[in-house]
Amino acid sequence: MRTVTLPDHTEVSALGQGTWRMGEDGRRREQEIAALRSGIDLGMTLIDTAEMYGDGATETLVGEALTGVRDQVFLISKVYPQHAGKGRLEWACEASLNRLKTDRLDLYLLHWRGSVPLAETIEGMDALVRAGKIRRWGVSNFDHEDMEELFRAGGEVCATNQILYNVTERGPEFDLLPLLARHHMPVMAYSPIGQGALPASPALSAVASRLNATPFQVALAWVLRDPRVIAIPKAGAAAHVVDNRRALDLVLTAEDLAAIDADFPAPTRKTHLAML
Ligand SMILES: NC(=O)c1ccc[n+]([C@@H]2O[C@H](COP(=O)([O-])OP(=O)(O)OC[C@H]3O[C@@H](n4cnc5c(N)ncnc54)[C@H](OP(=O)(O)O)[C@@H]3O)[C@@H](O)[C@H]2O)c1
């Protein structure tokens, strides 16, 4: 498995697994657990979840899927902004740990910016690191200005910024990705295949047919073309997990990239970071 290096030199899988909407339908439970476990077997050992997903039901499902394999996994959860203040952060983290049936998170992310001052959240995150509850922390849905403010507030040890990034959402290439690169901070791309609903694209179709792949695999390979990007597609079906793993091995040529640029142009001006 190809890896991406975090600012503290930890290596994580470039291709991980998302979990949004898992654990919400009991009839799909076994299939979702099997999908996550097959992904781990295939080396997709970075798993992203959040206290928000299914009101905790997703973390509970992930905890079950990790039975016996927790130590092989780089486990990420996310805290609601309204829980990211003094006292509540510790409580929210403890609740996530309980649902996930683990004693520590490898990465804890602030899900999006809220009204709690960044310095207070940083202080709380640092305290969780000292207590051994989390190994490191990061943010999500932070635009360029938010990152600048985070750095000014003492957040240089932030591990990553998890953002919406895929062929249809290239805005971050304008200023956010360069800023993160200057800070040696990888980006974590969520919804890397557009939530399974990419628009029809002659380029994606043509490249897919040349590589004997699907347009989704090509779109995922496109996100992964950048060595500083970690992608976390969600697949509740084991066949999709296998497809996603294979996408990591697809090699896109300069011609392929140019064709994809023609269908999905790179940004030429600042646009605000979109979020789901
Ligand atoms: N920080 C945030 O605010 C934020 C926001 C959104 C998402 N996220 C994280 O990012 C993860 C991924 O994003 P996402 O779930 O929004 O969207 P996504 O990963 O782009 O797409 C997931 C959808 O695509 C389908 N799919 C997966 N692999 C496929 C393949 N190879 N071919 C065709 N369809 C495929 C899945 O179907 P099946 O499930 O049926 O396999 C599912 O319907 C989330 O699960 C979550 O962990 C974070």
Image: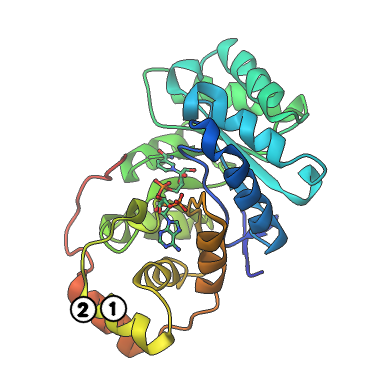
Residue neighbourhood size for the residue with mark 2, other residues' Cα within 10 Å, grouped as few (<14), some (14–19), many (≥20): some
Say what secondary structure mark 1 lies in: helix
Q: Check if mark 1's residue and mark 2's residue have beta carbons within 8 Å.
A: yes
- Left or right? Give the position of 243 relative to 264: right
Kindly indicate the quadrant of the structure image that contains residue 200. Answer: bottom left
Say what secondary structure mark 2 lies in: helix
**Residue at the spot of label 1:** 205
- Left or right? Give the position of 237 relative to 223: right
Residue 117 visible to an observer of this rendering: no
Residue drawn 33% across the image and 46% down it: 144
* Location of residue 267 in the rendering, given as x and y in whole percent from the top left corner: 21, 63
On residue 202, the disc is 2
Residue 185 visible to an observer of this rendering: yes
Residue drawn 28% across the image and 78% down it: 205
The three-letter code of the residue at mark 1 reads: Ser
The three-letter code of the residue at mark 2 reads: Pro
Image quarter of the N terminus: bottom right
In the displayed structure, 24 sits above or below 46; it is above
Work out which residue is located at the far top of the displayed protein and give it.
87
Kindly indicate the quadrant of the structure image that contains residue 77. Answer: top right
- Left or right? Give the position of 276 relative to 120: left
Real-space Cα separation, disc 1 to disc 2, in angstroms: 5 Å
* Location of residue 246 in the rendering, given as x and y in whole percent from the top left corner: 55, 73
Residue drawn 58% across the image and 55% down it: 16
Residue drawn 66% across the image and 39% down it: 136
User: Does the residue tagged 2 have its C-beta within 8 Å of any atom of ligand 1?
Assistant: no
Colouring: rainbow
* Location of residue 87 in the rendering, given as x and y in whole percent from the top left corner: 60, 10
